[in-house]
Amino acid sequence: MKEPPEYNPRKTPAYLNTTVMAGAALVVIFLIMAMRGGPVAGALAPLIGLLGIVFHWSIAVPMFLLVLSYLLLFPFGIPGITLGFAEVTGRYFEVTDIALAAAVVVYVMSHLRLTSLARQAMPTDIERQRNQPMALLSPRAVEAEHWQRLLIVTGCVVLVGQLGWLLLTNLRVDLLSVPPLKFAGADYSLRGGFGFPISPPFGRCLMLLCGVTVIILITRFGFWYWSLVKLTPDQGQMILLDTQWRDLRREVNRREKWRAWARPGGRYVRPKVKRRRSFWGSPRMFIYIPMAMLMIFALTVFYINTYAR
Amino acid sequence: MLTARGWWLLITIGSIAFLGVVGLGWWSATIPIIGLTLLAWMAYLWIDFGSRVRAAQGSIVVKRRFVQAGREVPAVWAGLPFQVKVTITLDSPLSLPAVLATDRNSIEVLQRREPPKYLHDSVPLSAGEPIELVSTIRFQGAGSIRFEGVQLRVSDLGGLFYWRVFLREPFELHVLPPLTDDEGQRQGTKRINVLPPPGLHRLKRPGGGSELLDLRDYLPGDPPKMIAWKSSARRDRLITKEFESDVPVRCVLFLDSSNPTRLGEPGQTALAKMASIASGIAQAASATRDLVGLTVFDKSQFDSLLPARTRPHLIRMMRLLAKAAGQIPESIVNDPDQAARHALPIAKELYPDLLVKPVNSRPFGLFWVPLSDSRWLWLVLFMLVWPSLVMKREVAELVATVAKGISPSGLAWLGFLGLMFIPPAFALLFWFIYGIRGIFSPRSDNTSRRKQLAALFAFQDGSGPAGLERLLNDDGYFVKRVAQFLQRHRVILPVDMFDSNGQAIYHEPEKVEVLCRAMTLSIGRAKGNELYVILIDLLDYASEIDKLLTAIRVARARHHDVLVLVHWPDDVSLEPKPLAKRHLKRLDLGKAVRRGMAASYRAEFKRLRHQIVKAGGQALPLTAEDAVARVLDRLDRLRGAKVR
């Protein structure tokens, strides 16, 4: 019987489609970055992304993002040479920003999928399964997701990013007002509530942290409640048992102590193994030597005070 | 839920967003925009994945089927391949993006096969599209396979989020001993005329059979048709014919399932081999309409099936054999920490939902080492009550003298206070240090492991908080429960054959006593001439079979036959092979040891056989090839034929 050919994820349509998508995103990134700082600096981040795709480096995505951020800060790749200062207030819904953000999202998404398809899809979290085979993503899983949904998600997150930046730069923190946010308007002030200055970066930082925290808390609360609704009978029983045990622990523990006293073999006594470690290498040294020194010192003092005067 | 890949990405994106928003935005607004966009994308992925996972909780159904020879079966036959078909269905509107399903069974755990490098089965699971896992298994010997359930590992398409759940569907599949070969498939009709009909055996006692047994003087009341007229005429007095009895023979099989016979690869153990032979004997005997019974015994108990000849009885016997053959050796671990270390990974794999912190907590007080368990308590108590002792005048004077001696002049009061309050302070410090040790490794790890397992066991046993606390405090009870847990889930720990004193750990002479009890019970229930076939691993017990010899003598006294089939190691030949000259020239220590052991086996067996034959039984080495034939020969002899 002829054996089936060995599975090669790189030859599957899903892999090829995703590669094309990632490649297209890198081309867009290259074009935009080249427009900003020239082709050499513009090619650096896409090159890292390309190598990551070819060799399925997991670290390529963080590296790509860091290099891209660096090149956005210093478009020519030379530290200190920037496009200008304080462009912060004037850039909302710029076409290049939208295209770049969308391309970055598409690239990151595609890269992670390619890694899952060809290298590792999920971690091996069980101790016993450390030597188990790596799990790969089936091409079916990628094919099952509709492209329309993917495009809509990308569009939405790009929109959220733009809106987020718009809000962060147009709101200011005023701790004395309720809610503690105000539109900055034309008289954008550096002074916040309570008489201490809240600079715009610090205000933005506060707003970002608070926003993220609120989103996380609300989502976690929702998930927690959902988990409670979906609690299995076993889990419910276990929670009851655990709660009962915590409440009654002291009483039942006392009973077990009495039981252990009554039974000579109640507690397992480990066979004593003669340790070859010398006294000087043992923790006892740290107790015995200071105690001995203390005693010698006390005796000496006692002797001097009593007889040597 | 977030994987390592996810954490790295989140940290990078978070850093870019944070730095962009805080400071870099002055120079380039694109940095914070990209950071915020990616942050929004990750939040979307998190909410999406979390919703799908929670919607799927409790909505996944697993159905398992076993197919052998094209039809669904509740138990399978050994030696023939069978398919395990598992269907996983999701009853939720939200699908799971990538699911890797693994059907966990005891063979995978036990058989150390080379795994494939990659698995590419991480497929989506949605309401309309169930996942079907099909695996083909071929189990050589009798036994049983435990299917624990299905493990689902779910991730998103990018591998950033991960969730694992175990759908418990425990099922014990019996692998019945193989069907008999040509030897066992005997005809159920009478082949030779000298033999009685199948199922009947000649018993040389007066009865209603057809074979003439003896002639005797006529007694009043004898039926006239029994009078031997020719003999009567010859002797000039009435002589009556007596015929032999036609009785059924009950063949009772005794199978040793003690721990030493359970050692080895699944399906390849001594017990599995003996079970296969017992199955062959049972099937062949059933084919000739003999009654067959079975008793499975170990060191503590025995399980019996009374002799019968029906087909359901045969199936029951096969199941009992399969159940016996599937047993694994009891784990012998005395150290509770070591036992917990073995059991927790299995528990985490099979009961992940019952070991997570929200349902199985580890409060801080659990890790505190109580001083009351130690003899140091008395010293600490003494130091604590020391100031009150000083209130006594004599003690106070003594302390004052000492204080005066050790203190500089004029500061004796300071020395006095020090001598009064330093001991209690030291006692409190000692109490704190003694107790806090519990939060450091390895003590904390051991405590944590034990609490998790104790809660799980108390939950399974339904013993409540008292049972949980007992498992935490009673080492012997905990170790026994862990062994039971491992036994149930068919986990074999690395077996040490000998203890630190060089004694065999699995030496169980108690099984002989249990066997004797079972034999005595069978003899008490016996009716005619019966055959007791004992399949036992007895090579190491030649000096401990006095009770067995007594049981054999009792059986012989009741006109029963006893055949002891002693398990013989596969790699040891029955007859010693002479060494070639070239081997004699040089000493090979390994070979010499093996030859020595083989010689000791033969000597032991010789001794055993001598004792058993002297008691009236027969002993044969159980070398799989001809064991069934030998027993059937024996049965035929009981039926009256000299040879088969």
Image: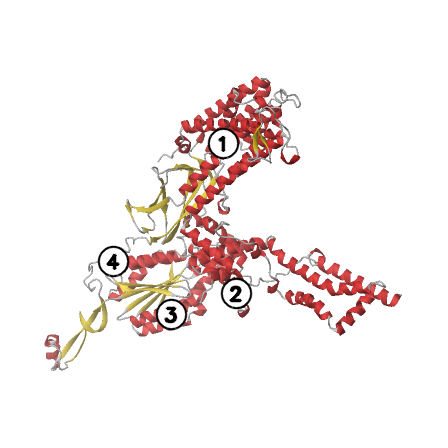
Q: Nearer the viewer, mark 2 or mark 4?
A: 2
Chain for disc number 2: A
Residue reaching furthest to the front: A177
Q: Nearer the viewer, mark 3 or mark 1?
A: 1
Residue B23 placed where, x, y %? 62, 29
Marks 3/1 in contact by CB < 8 Å: the verdict is no
Q: Residue at x 54, y 59 (%)?
A: B335
Asked if residue A224 can be seen in this view, the reply is: yes
Q: Which quadrant of the structure image shows residue B532?
A: bottom left
Upstream in sequence: badge 1 or badge 4: 1
Residue A154 placed where, x, y %? 47, 27
Chain for disc number 3: B
Upstream in sequence: badge 4 or badge 3: 4
Q: Label 4, label 3: how many angstroms apart (C-alpha)?
A: 28 Å
Q: Amino acid at mark 3?
A: Cys
Q: Residues within 10 Å of mark 3 (few under 14, many from 20)?
A: some
Q: Residue at x 52, y 38 (%)?
A: A214
Marks 1/4 in contact by CB < 8 Å: the verdict is no
Front residue of this view, candidates B231 and B251 = B251
Chain for disc number 4: B
Asked if residue B616 can be seen in this view, the reply is: no
Q: Report the residue marked by disc 2.
A: A256
Q: Label 2, label 4: how many angstroms apart (C-alpha)?
A: 53 Å
Q: Report the residue marked by disc 3.
A: B516
